[in-house]
Each structure stands twice: as structure tokens, then as C-alpha cells.
Amino acid sequence: MNDVTSDMPTEIPDDVRYAPSHEWARIDDEVVTVGISDFAQQSLGDVVYVELPQVGDEVSAGTEACVVESVKAAADVYAPVSGTVVAVNETLEESPEMVNQDPYGDGWFFKVEPTDVEELDDLLDADGYEQHCESEDDED
């Protein structure tokens, strides 16, 4: 996700890490769950389709892992960490609006078994991500 801006207040939970491209990553039992931030889903508008990776796909941090389409635009979603996709959120095939309704919960995209869990340290914490979003808003 890039070129994302929004005028609405944004939820930024502090239990996840954030990529500057607006993906979030939450580690739980050595598996990283990935989705897009509230800021990103608000900016995209109503999500109408999500093209998910396949279980077993290898993803690399910072590279395209899947695509999200909204009424406004289509956007690439980048892997925040490298590893193997171990699960995808099949609910999004029938209910892509979950991305808008619950971006940090039921609207997750995929889960990765990371090859290097320390890549999470390269991501932004909630305060850093909030500052990043504010700086993007200031550019408009």
C-alpha cells in the first residue's frame, strides 16, 4: 500500500508493528498475522475484492504479497516480513468488507511463518506509525 491519505481519525493499536506502506504485523506463537491498517482501509474506501497469496507461497519483506481492490482503487499489499504463507483469510473471498469493518481482527489477510522474526524490529511501533501517517497527511 502506498500513496494513502485520510482525513478521518485512525485506530492505531499498540500490539502490532507497522510497515511504512500501511501493512500491520502481529506475532502470535511464532506466526505473523498480516493485514492493512485502519488508515489504509479508510483511504481505500469500500473494499470489494482481495486477491490473497496461496498457502505455501514464499514472501519477502517489502515485496508484493497480494492485492486489495476498493471502489476507489486497486493497491498492492506488501509483506512486512519474509517467510512462508501458512494461512489465508478465506472469509475475505465472500466478505471483503471485513477489511473495512475490522482491519485488525477479522479483516486480516494472511499468516506467515517468518524466516527471521527480527525483521519485525525494522517495522514501526504505534507511535512511529502515527507520526508517519501524520507526515503523509501533511504532504497533501
Image (cartoon, helix red, strand yellow):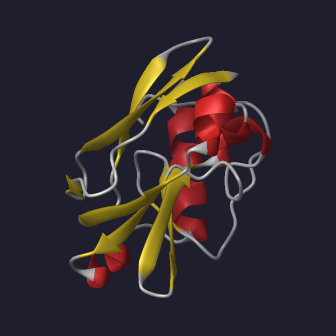
Q: Is residue 20 left or right of residue 109?
A: left
Q: Is residue 30 in view from this perspective?
A: yes
Placement of 26 over or under 49, stated as above or below: below
Q: Residue at x 25, y 51 (%)?
A: 62
Residue 96 visible in the picture: no
Could you tell me which quadrant the C terminus lies in? top right
In the picture, measured across the screen, residue 36 lies left or right of residue 94, that is left
Residue 72 is situated, as x and y percent measured from the top left of the image, at 58, 12
**Which quadrant of the figure has residue 90?**
top right
**If the image is split into quadrants, where does the N terminus sit?**
top left
Residue at (23, 55) in percent of width and height? 59
Q: Measuring 60% from the left and 68% from the top, which residue is drawn there?
A: 126
Q: Between 124 and 116, which is closer to the camera in this rendering?
A: 116
Foreground residue among 111 and 104: 111
- Residue lying farthest to the bottom in this orientation: 29
Expressed as whole percent of the image width and height from the top left, the position of residue 70 reads 59, 19
The vertical placement of 16 against 39, above or below, is below
Q: Is residue 128 above or below residue 106?
A: below
The picture places residue 102, in percent across and down from the top left corner, at 75, 49
Q: Is residue 78 left or right of residue 135?
A: left
- Could you tell me residue 5's position as x and y percent? 58, 30
Task: From the viewer's side, name the closer residue of 135 and 124.
Answer: 124
